[in-house]
Structures are given as structure tokens and as C-alpha cells.
Amino acid sequence: MPIAAHRVDDGQTLVIRVDGRFDFSTHQAFRDAYEQADPAIKRYVVDLSDTTYLDSSALGMLLLLRDHAGGDSARISIENCNSDVRRILSISNFEQLFRIC
């Protein structure tokens, strides 16, 4: 499954893992991952360690997650990006909207 989500032991963090291509074909699964999460979730981690490709629809999905999580006050980190994915996020100035590590 290209999108998997699980709560961390603290009960307030949701990790969303994207495997393979992060594009429009994953839209509904990505959205379901955070919309169906417990309302107690306060922090989101998007794990891209196994993401091989990211396109503009994926950038839009990240922005939708940001809106869902509270906009400017959202606590979202994008982690474990390979160099190609990190470059796309950087070109798109996403480091100003998300914590990227």
C-alpha cells in the first residue's frame, strides 16, 4: 500500500508514510490518512523515506494537510527525503511552510 498511517506512542502524533510515487493516484489514500485520524492528533510527520517521485499534485496534498492541521499554526514535519524530493520541496519554497528534515 503506497500510503500507511500510524499513531506514535505519545498519542498526539500521526506518521503518514508514502511509498513509491507520491502523485495524484495517492490523493484519496493520503487524504483519508489524516481525515480519519483521531481528533487528538496535534502533530503530523510525513515520512518520505521510500518516496521515489513527487509531483505538483503531491505538493497540493501537503498544502491540504497543512490547512487541515491548522494552517500557520500546524505542526507538520516532512522527513527522510531523498535529494530529488528535497530539491522539489526547496524549489517550491516548502521549507517556509513545513519543517523539512
Image (cartoon, grey):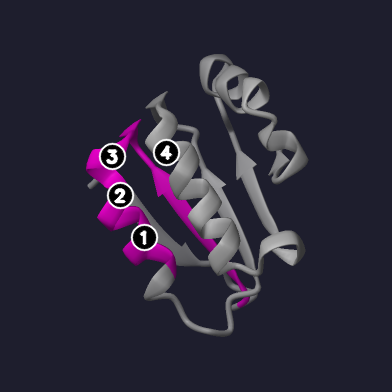
Q: Earlier in the sequence, mark 4 or mark 1?
A: 1
- The answer for how far apart the CA atoms under marks 2 and 4 are is 8 Å
Q: CA distance from mark 4 to mark 3?
A: 7 Å
Q: Amino acid at mark 1?
A: Arg
Q: Secondary structure at mark 3?
A: helix
Q: Which residue is mark 2?
A: 27
- Whether 28 is among the magenta residues is yes
Q: Position of residue 43 (x, y in %)?
A: 65, 66
Give the distance between the C-alpha atoms of the residues marked 3 and 1, in whole angstroms: 11 Å
Tell me if label 2 and label 3 are in contact, CB under 8 Å. yes
Looking at the image, residue 45 lies above or below residue 74: above
Span shown in magenta: 12-34
Q: Earlier in the sequence, mark 3 or mark 1?
A: 3
Decide: is 42 above or below 16.
below
Q: Residue at x 52, y 58 (%)?
A: 65
Q: Secondary structure at mark 4?
A: helix
Please say if the residues under marks 4 and 1 sit with CB atoms less than 8 Å apart. no
Q: Are marks 1 and 2 in contact (CB under 8 Å)?
A: yes
Give the image location of residue 100, x and y in percent: 70, 37
Question: Which of 91/7 is in front?
Answer: 91
Q: Residue at x 58, y 84 (%)?
A: 40
Residue 35 vertical placement versus 56 (above, below) = below
Q: What is the crowding at mark 2: few (fewer than 14 residues within 10 Å), some, or many (at least 20)?
A: some
Q: Marks 2 and 3, how far apart in space?
A: 5 Å
Q: Which residue is mark 1?
A: 31
Amino acid type at circle 4 is Ala
Question: Label 4 near label 2: C-beta < 8 Å?
Answer: no
| Residue tagged 3 | 24
- The residue carrying mark 4 is 58
